[in-house]
Amino acid sequence: MKITNIEVFLLTEWRNFLFVRVDTDADISGWGEAGITNREWAVAGCLRHLESLIVGQSPFNSEHLWQLCWRSGFFPAGQILSAAIAAVDIALWDIKGKALGVPVYQLLGGKTRERVLTYRHLSPTPQESLFANARQAIEEGWEALRWEPALVEGAIHDPAFAISTGLEQWRQMRDLVGQEVALCYDMHTRLAIPDAIRMCRLIEEFAPFFVEDPVRSEHASGYEKLVRHCSVPLAAGEQYANKWQFRELIEKELIDYARVDLCVAGGITEAMKIAALAEAHLIDVAVHNPIGPISTAACAHFNTAITNMGIMELPRLPGETMSSAVATSCTWRHGYLTVDDSPGLGIQVDVDRFEQFVYRADQMPSVRKQDGSFNNW
């Protein structure tokens, strides 16, 4: 079996998506998805460069092809190229599973669990909606919820407002859902280290499942100061592209949950290595999965197979994204995602329906500080 073609699909529904189909001469195709939302043209350009490297190669040699795509340009891959490699890599695992008639999780070592714990997104504003949505989520069966600090009207980040509002939200949320529901708090890399320390210490009493991305990811050593001053479980890594970027946080044990994004960090092949590195330090994996149904399927198989799975992000349930074009065999019930024994990733794609999802290039939301300067969204 040889790879014959790579086709890229740029699509828009509730957000932008980049899907990749890898075709073979055995009439078996695999599907992958790339991360880095709102930089799809850049990722698509990388995929054009990669096509000539992998056409004619065996899809079963996924490790070799990963190394070839990563290193053959001389300069090590960054996030954009890594996202392109991720889409191809996920598609190759899909092909291998289909060719062998087994689900992808079997190729990764088989099941270590029957179901995967997931968490739901909640919007922090307005507060009435935050708590109403939390009540609804509990009624639907969710066992874990996540929200982020509120912004001042006009998308302005004010640390004092974020901290005071966040603290009050934590009090009310814990009173609302009790102690049994896991609560995750995503600071979205917005806070300076002193503000992050203050926020983390103030909410310790409410027993967060984890506090995510309290500070920017570019300076991993910043977490050393953070962990000296607070004891909440910390999660980070969704912006990282490879095991080398994760290494400092993991080896120095500065985080409790590694936020691996399969569609950014080199696909299933690289994510398995990051998970193994984390396991050696008793760190669990909390997969970052904010995009489409192919990502969700890949993450579900990955989490079914690894030993140190902590929790999985799930902004949309199976069948809620592009349902007319993409069908998945994943099912969700009472807070948990389950995969069946369908070959590959267990997804079916109707390319003819993609015309309903015309791509619209866009930018991420823009957040400012009180003085008008830029701040991370």
Image (tube, rainbow, N blue to C red):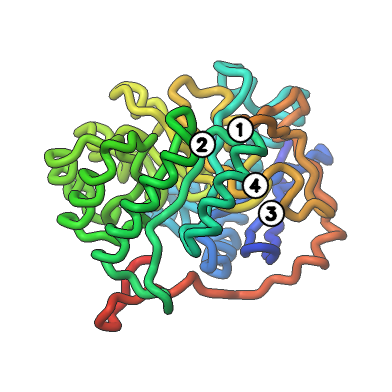
Rounded to the nearest whole Å, what is the CA distance between mark 2 and mark 1? 7 Å
The image shows residue 285 at horizontal and vertical percentages of 43, 32
Rounded to the nearest whole Å, what is the CA distance between mark 1 and mark 4? 25 Å
State which quarter of the image contains the C terminus: bottom left
Residue 144, numbered label: 2
Rounded to the nearest whole Å, what is the CA distance between mark 4 and mark 3? 11 Å
**Can residue 72 be seen in this snapshot?**
yes
Residue 343 vertical placement versus 214 (above, below): above
Sequence-earlier tag: 2 or 1: 2
Instruction: Please tell me which residue is depicted at 62% across the width and 24% down the height of the picture.
Output: 115
Sequence-earlier tag: 4 or 2: 4
Rounded to the nearest whole Å, what is the CA distance between mark 2 and mark 3? 38 Å
**Kind of residue at badge 2:** Ala
Which of discs 1 and 4 lies nearer the camera? The answer is: 1
Instruction: Please tell me which residue is depicted at 47% across the width and 20% down the height of the picture.
Output: 307
Which of discs 3 and 1 lies nearer the camera? The answer is: 1
Sequence-earlier tag: 4 or 3: 3
**Residue 299 picture quarter:** top right
Residue 6, numbered label: 3
Sequence-earlier tag: 3 or 1: 3
Residue 17 vertical placement versus 21 (above, below): below
Q: Residues within 10 Å of mark 1 (few under 14, many from 20)?
A: many
Residue 335, numbered label: 1
Specify whether 358 is left or right of 72.
Answer: right
